[in-house]
Image (cartoon, coloured by chain):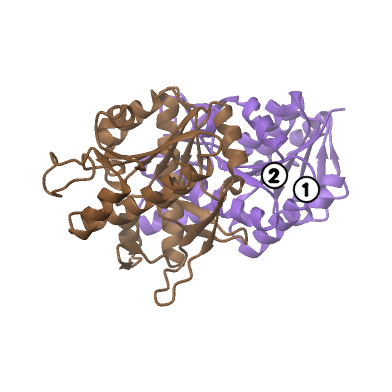
Chain colours: A purple, B brown
Amino acid sequence: MTRLLVVKISGNIIDDEVKLFSFLKEFAGIDAPKILVHGGGKLATKLAETMGVKQQLVDGRRITDAETLKIVTMVYAGYINKNIVARLQSHHCNALGLCGADGDSILAHKRKHPVVDYGYVGDVDAINTTLLKSLLDQNITIVFAPITHDQQGQLLNTNADTIAQEVAKGLSHQFDVSLVYSFEKSGVLLDAEDDSTVIAELTPSYYKQLKEKEKIFAGMIPKLDNAFTALNNGVKKVIIGKAENLRQLIDGSSGTTIINE
Amino acid sequence: MTRLLVVKISGNIIDDEVKLFSFLKEFAGIDAPKILVHGGGKLATKLAETMGVKQQLVDGRRITDAETLKIVTMVYAGYINKNIVARLQSHHCNALGLCGADGDSILAHKRKHPVVDYGYVGDVDAINTTLLKSLLDQNITIVFAPITHDQQGQLLNTNADTIAQEVAKGLSHQFDVSLVYSFEKSGVLLDAEDDSTVIAELTPSYYKQLKEKEKIFAGMIPKLDNAFTALNNGVKKVIIGKAENLRQLIDGSSGTTIINE
């Protein structure tokens, strides 16, 4: 099967134009079918402040009221997505930006939670792999903004890590998928303060062991749980590491590679 | 050849949610390949006010400085485009929103003008008809935001009427294209204040005659010049009329039809 890279870049890269442009140049140069999923960074929070819209966070997740949804739709699907696409185009990478409503590419439903009302937050139900494969076959690089829809006319704010995982899983029947979570750290660390303690390879049993010893930084757990779910659903490999080392992450010489035993 | 509808909706429909939703329901129900091009409306101006960004207009055209470009990218390519797409999806119309950078669908250059610096405003150079045809062939309805790019990484604010015209012209080799400019009036009027004075049919010679007699409202002239340019470049028919009468515009029972002699 053809290899497909699904790369998620985190907010802190998006907030730093020099790092972002350097990352995008590197990404554009990768000669393989590829999908980029971006988060939001601080731009949405800043715009909300300017507009006087108060932000609420519960367990690190933004509560998305109607005004916040408007802001994230503007910032994620508009400003960030289109600037990334234009930048990739300048490096002769034929990028095309989508949110989940576009071509019904990612169908979701509004999160139901017994206690917390997250507002307009979406949990993913389905990926339109026919559309995505058709675009990839035309040598198009897809750039996803973390906004989905419910087929009833409602846009929904959706976690970008989850989108990357769902897209990777969805396309694993047609492609040999590597899922890359790139962020500010060098990988999964044994000591969160020491970038030299990268775990080169993480298996389910080793992960379980580290979690029991509370050696895994709490913020990493949802990302790693996502990674193992992806592996159990057809994704070949999940790689976590520094955005600046994209090529080394892909060739396995940097970051943490997560594989089944 | 297969018929293709290219429909442009003006800002005042976008500003009125009831009218917009009713229009989109009607548009979704049209069983033919179709492209929607939307303008911006007052949302961008309102957001600029909230953000304290001063707006400048010269000859009815917005001067697009860097901050204004950011705002129109957020509002046009983000908020408006994605909400239109989600709404069309709710009516089982498989819509996909693009700006000109997406898939290099509309290439433009920054306007050069001997006197006025319009800022980040784009004039269209080329339409990627291969991509558009491939999407239309997959039964996808394309929704264009009036933002283009220059292939050097720069997004550009671009007149939506012009985008509609260029897309219609570009696809006229592959489709039998009708270009519909829908707005708040019933068509091209002999008396701008009287909606019953619609000109049913406008030919180049009749247009010339009316212009000489100063019978054409100044604001209509760029739209009509656009219309005739489209006709001279392969578009079969241009129709101007009320967005509420979309079906009647298409079947010729409402609005002004612009045709060659």
**Residue at the image point whose x is 33% and y is 26% from the top:** B26
Q: Secondary structure at mark 2?
A: loop
Is residue A154 visible in the rendered image? The answer is no
Residue A205 is situated, as x and y percent measured from the top left of the image, at 83, 29
Figure quadrant of residue A256: top right
Q: Which residue is mark 1?
A: A189
Q: Judge whether A120 appears above or below B31 on screen.
A: below
Q: Residues within 10 Å of mark 1 (few under 14, many from 20)?
A: many
Residue at the far bottom: name it: B115
Residue B231 is situated, as x and y percent measured from the top left of the image, at 41, 45
Q: Is there one chain holding both mark 1 and mark 2?
A: yes
Left or right of B100 on screen, residue B25: left
Residue A225 is situated, as x and y percent measured from the top left of the image, at 69, 32
Q: What is the CA distance from the residue labelled 1 to the residue labelled 2?
A: 8 Å
Q: Residues within 10 Å of mark 2 (few under 14, many from 20)?
A: some
Residue B114 is situated, as x and y percent measured from the top left of the image, at 44, 76
Type of amino acid at the residue the image marks with label 1: Leu
B257, A214: nearer the viewer: B257
Is residue B145 visible in the rendered image? The answer is yes
Q: Earlier in the sequence, mark 1 or mark 2?
A: 1
> Does the CB distance between marks 1 and 2 fall below 8 Å?
yes
> So how many labels did they put on this image?
2
B236, B217: nearer the viewer: B236
**Residue at the image point whose x is 62% and y is 34% from the top:** A162
Q: Which mark is residue A60?
A: none
Q: Judge whether A223 appears above or below A184 on screen.
A: above
Q: Secondary structure at mark 1?
A: loop
**Residue at the image point whose x is 41% and y is 62% from the top:** B68
Figure quadrant of residue B187: top left
Circle 1 chain = A
Left or right of A230 on screen, residue B39: left
Q: Which residue is mark 2?
A: A217
